[in-house]
Amino acid sequence: MLADNINYLKKKDPMLYKLLKKSEENKQEPQVILEEAKNNQKTLKIKKDNKTVYLHSKYDPDKEAELIIDKLAEREEITESTHVIFYGLGLGYHLDVFFRRFPQIEFSIYEPSFEVLIHYLNQKSLKNLPLKQLITIQCEGDNNGMCAFFNALITGGKKQSIICDLPSYQKIFAEEYTAFLNQFREVVKSMRSSMHTNYAFEKRWILNSVINFKEVLTTPNILMENNAAFKGQTAIMVAAGPSLDYEIENLRSIKENRSAYIFSVGSAINTLLHHHVLPDVVCTYDPTKENQLVFKTMNELNETSIPMIFGSSVGFETLEEYKGLKYHTITSQDAVSYYFLKVKNDQELVTVSDAPTIAAVTLELIYKLGFEKVILVGQNLAYLNNKYYANGIDHQKTIEAEKEKGNFYQEIPDIDMVHGTEMLIDVDGKEVNTNDGFISMKKTLEFYMKNYDLLVVNSTKGGAQIEGAEFIPLEELIQSSLKPGSFEGNEFRNIRRSELYDKEYIQEKLLEITKAYEVYQGLLVLMKQQLIKIDELVMNKNTKQATLMYQKLDQSILALESNDFAKIFALPMNRVEHELLARNVQRIKKEKNELKKVASLIAYVNAFVNLLYGDSLLNKQLIDILTERISVAFKENEENQKKSSVL
């Protein structure tokens, strides 16, 4: 290995260096051989399945590399926002050509063979590559190599990733290449979904948490004030899948005999109301304005006898409309409650994690309530008889409608499919039609199930197989394990709000956040002044003063990011933009031309500061709403205490 490469790896990636040394010391018959091509350049050939295959052209590796990059440039738009993943390093001819054309592009390297990587490090210096643009370099080695590679991309790479592979690798490392592509697609899909979710809800999460704070302070915390009422019991989690139609009479029997608690999630409440079967509780946490439509029928019927468990960041309209009993649980997206709430007697605040599906959130809720077993009903995660939902739900979807939107697919083992390779099999071992949303829900549910000491049974007829949940028809469970009279039926109604949260602490935090808001406003004004001054210095090409002034601006940014109002409200409401700013600043700071660097930095910072300025009216409203909601909640609780003492 060249001395330059040894020094670089020891300093920047000691783990990879150790793996390479271990591979070198493990002397076996070489499978990768270095030889000269016809044009006197070096090339590599590899022994595979009793055949010898060249990684590069045995005639002219450099010309071959030119063609590879030509095709890549025709296929992909390569800009400064592109991140290129080189799958297969070989002797790096294609990298040399690429960076002669695109010297400023971020990149990562993934090499499936230690032998090949060692040959490269013996022949070429990594310093010949634009290392300041390198995100990560990884060699497969074991099953952890690919995970480590994609973890590095998620935390440090850019969003617009493309793959540049050596064509020979598709044949020589066919299985490894297929696995890599599949994992890449999953990571890209997950990153896009996460960014889309954050962007869609970043302001909504905060707004909901503020408006709902009065409901949090005036309702029982279901996870902390239930007095172990549900310990050892069985819950039935009823979702809105089409197989719910088959279970109505079974659920009616369970309800009448009080043999298990019925939890309604999502739109299932509409099917249950349609058939006059009232669940023991409804659960909701969706932050969108549209979430209130799920309970439109229940509100129109003035059905207020069903207790509602809500996540604290749920769409505030849902809580405003529903007049029945409510119980809250704090969700992981609710930064407001985390800031204001302190549980008395030094207890830890018990919360639930935000998840892409209400089923996963409710599963965690059921587990933390102390239930011993949960039975899934209507959790199809697939279409059944061309239907998405059970009867009684107005917003019915069909396969044909979803095809038109581009959401539908039937998974088949084809590595070229955008959506993946996993087969979706139902509880009877047959293939079923599904879509992206269902696949995501299934994986999330299975992930959550692995973390809980909770027996999960799947009673969804015609639904997807769910790993970790044995399929047993509901009628069999009624006969074998659901005992009539397992509970009284008033357990939810008997839960009362106690003085769980420290009232004085909430008042102190309100005073602190109000002061922090005033400081935050001053910081925005200061930063705007600094940006104007830096812009003038850049225009006058005063590099030294521009750099010094940017350092002051940098200190202002740090002060803003440590401000409580910014941390709880302003930055979470712009979390996607804040993340993009941080990534762009990190990238630009590698620029060697000081004046150009400062000019680029202030362009991004100015855009972000203007974005924060745009929220000024909303910020003031949030402080006013919080102050009013806390005051109303305290008065309402005092009045209820007086009424209770009189009774």
Image: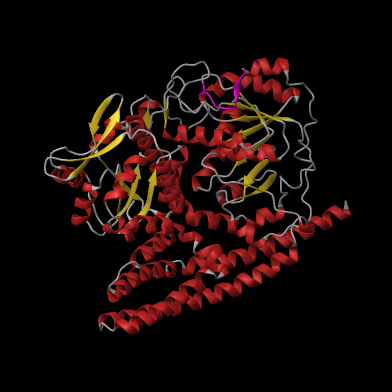
Please indicate whether residue 222 sits to the left or right of residue 111 in the image.
right
Q: Is residue 88 visible?
A: yes
**119 and 167: which is toward the camera:** 119
The count of marks equals 0
Is 346 a magenta residue? no
**124 and 589: which is toward the camera:** 124
Which of the 4 image quadrants contains residue 183? Answer: top left
x, y percentage for residue 567?
54, 65
- Residue at 50% from the left image edge and 34% from the top image edge: 443
Magenta residues, dominant SS class: loop
Please indicate whether residue 328 sits to the left or right of residue 111 in the image.
right
Q: How is the image coloured?
A: secondary structure
Is 465 a magenta residue? yes
- Residue at 37% from the left image edge and 77% from the top image edge: 531
x, y percentage for residue 341?
68, 59
Which of the 4 image quadrants contains residue 298? Answer: top right
**339 and 254: which is toward the camera:** 339
Please indicate whether residue 490 sits to the left or right of residue 569 in the image.
right
Please indicate whether residue 453 sits to the left or right of residue 25 in the image.
right
Residue lying at the far right in this picture: please name it.
646
Residue lying at the far left in this picture: please name it.
39
Q: Is residue 266 visible?
A: no
x, y percentage for residue 620?
53, 69
Q: Which residues are magenta?
A: 463-472
Q: Is residue 517 above or below residue 231?
A: below
x, y percentage for residue 385?
45, 19
